Image: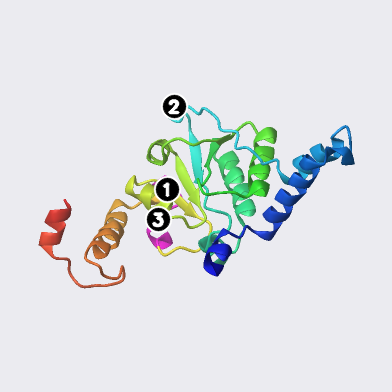
Amino acid sequence: IVLQSIKNTKPPLEFIQNRLYLLFARYPIIESNGALLNILKQRFFSRQHMNYDAYDFFNKRYILFPLQVSVDSQVIRNSDISIYEALDIAHKEALNNQCDLVIKPHPAEKNDSLIKYINSMKSKNENIYFVKDNTYLLIKHAFKLLTINSTVGIEAMMYYKPVKVLGKSFYQPYCSENEEGVCKQRINKFLFNYIFNILKDASFFDNSTIDSEILKDYL
């Protein structure tokens, strides 16, 4: 019973918000015109909405910035910049390259402050777009990809795309920030070791050979 009670316990702030809402909804005589209730609803219960765009990624030049969850440990522990700073850097990168900035949010993102920040950026800049299209299609047609340290960077490397890593990542030495520096041979070697060492349940840094039968099964 105790464990079930703990499991069902809501976060303190959410619990307080719900209680306040129920209180004023149940006893509207506290303020007959409902103004106080509306203020409380706007302050505690309104959520920022992601204003997605219909973007022609087939025919436009753009930099793709796939977001990570703002409280992701990789963002917090393995990056010297915040996700807000990363957004500003990505926008400057797009301006310098005279192209659009296409932002794809993480589906698990619940940070209203971050969503509000992006919506504000969009309202002030005509070259920023917020999309929810298929990630692989976005990567395939992107001019370049920026990331803090998401593994989407590895997916972009599979398409031999320039990848700029803003945080700390183990794959950073194998990618290039510009098209001229993309080395397919180096990328292929990295991907071979990364993928097939995982398949054979070994460390990425393991230098032992890979069984050809495993490779055949995979292919």
Circle 3 Cα neighbour tier, 10 Å, few/some/many (<14 / 14–19 / ≥20)? many
* 172 falls in the magenta region: yes
User: How far, Cα to Cα, is label 3 from label 1?
Assistant: 7 Å
What's the amino acid at mark 1? Pro
- Is residue 79 at all visible to an observer of this figure? no
Mark 2: few/some/many CA within 10 Å (<14, 14-19, 20+): few
Tell me where the magenta segment starts and ends, as one range.
171-179
Of callouts 1 and 2, the N-terminal one:
2
Q: Which residue is mark 2?
A: 59
Question: Which x, y percent locates residue 1?
Answer: 53, 66
Percent of width and height locating residue 211? 13, 65
Measuring 37% from the left and 59% from the top, which residue is drawn there?
Answer: 174
Residue 67, labelled with which disc? none
Question: How far apart, in angstroms, are the residues tagged by discs 3 and 2?
Answer: 25 Å
Residue 187 placement, left or right of 9: left
Query: Is 163 or 74 nearer to us in this picture?
Result: 74
Q: Which mark is residue 162?
A: 1
Q: Position of residue 96 (x, y in %)?
A: 58, 42
Q: Is residue 127 above or below residue 213?
A: above
Identify the residue shown where x is 33% and y is 53%: 183
Q: Earlier in the sequence, mark 3 or mark 2?
A: 2
Please identify the quarter of the rendering in which residue 134 is found. top left
- Which amino acid does the dot numbered 3 rest on? Cys
In the image, residue 99 sits, relative to residue 151, either above or below, namely above
Q: Is residue 38 above or below residue 214?
A: above
Helix, strand or loop at mark 2: loop
Report the disc number at residue 175: 3
